[in-house]
Image (cartoon, helix red, strand yellow):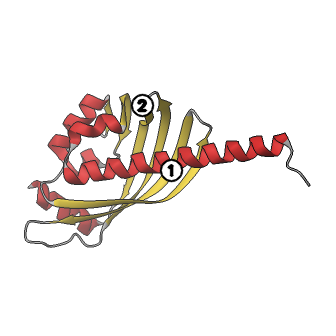
Amino acid sequence: MAEQPDDRDAQLERALRAADKIEIIERLSLYQQLLDSRDLDRMDEVLDVDAVVDYPGMEDNFDLGDDTIVGREAIVAWLRSSLVTARTVHYMTNHVFSRCDGSRADVRTYLLSFVYSSDGTVSSPHTTGIYDVELVRRAEGWRVVRLRLEHLYLPETVAFIRGLHGSG
């Protein structure tokens, strides 16, 4: 039985959505790598100019200012002042898309983060969390317009990170 034109259109649409998802996952991976390398000048490759990030608990747990930051420049400035000097390695895993329609996407992904102090000690237990991310397609590719990270901290992790910030 020969393929119908509608079948080819549906296959093409699925292939395009799959390509979008790959590009989006690459953007999210780049976000994590830029954080780890502290190469924050490249955040324009990930964040939309008017992006909004929410890091609930950062103010209460670590005295790091507002939990919600608006605009790429403000986000980058906040990250520069907030990231610990210790080495970090972030992983985003288990990407599940609730929307990916060619122009907008919503994805939930898990965070697993390792923090190494200057003496090589690793934070234990490791920092985990859940990212909810909204992206839009721009001329230069997919960009994050809203990112929310709900950290799932244990008290000993908070104490470890506060110590790295000198506030513990």
| Amino acid, disc 1 | Ile
Q: Which residue is mark 2?
A: 140
Q: Is residue 45 above or below residue 23?
A: above
Q: Earlier in the sequence, mark 1 or mark 2?
A: 1
- Does residue 157 appear anywhere in the picture? yes
**Label 1 vs label 2: CA separation?**
15 Å
Q: Is residue 14 left or right of residue 129?
A: right
Disc number for residue 22 = 1
User: Residue 54, percent across and down?
Assistant: 36, 41
> Which residue appears at 92% of the width and 55% of the height?
1
> Which residue appears at 69% of the width and 43% of the height?
12
Residue reaching furthest to the right: 1
Answer few, some or many: residues within 10 Å of disc 2's Cα (few below 14, many 20 plus, some between 14 and 19): few
Q: Is residue 76 left or right of residue 10?
A: left
| Amino acid, disc 2 | Glu
Q: Is residue 165 above or below residue 135?
A: below
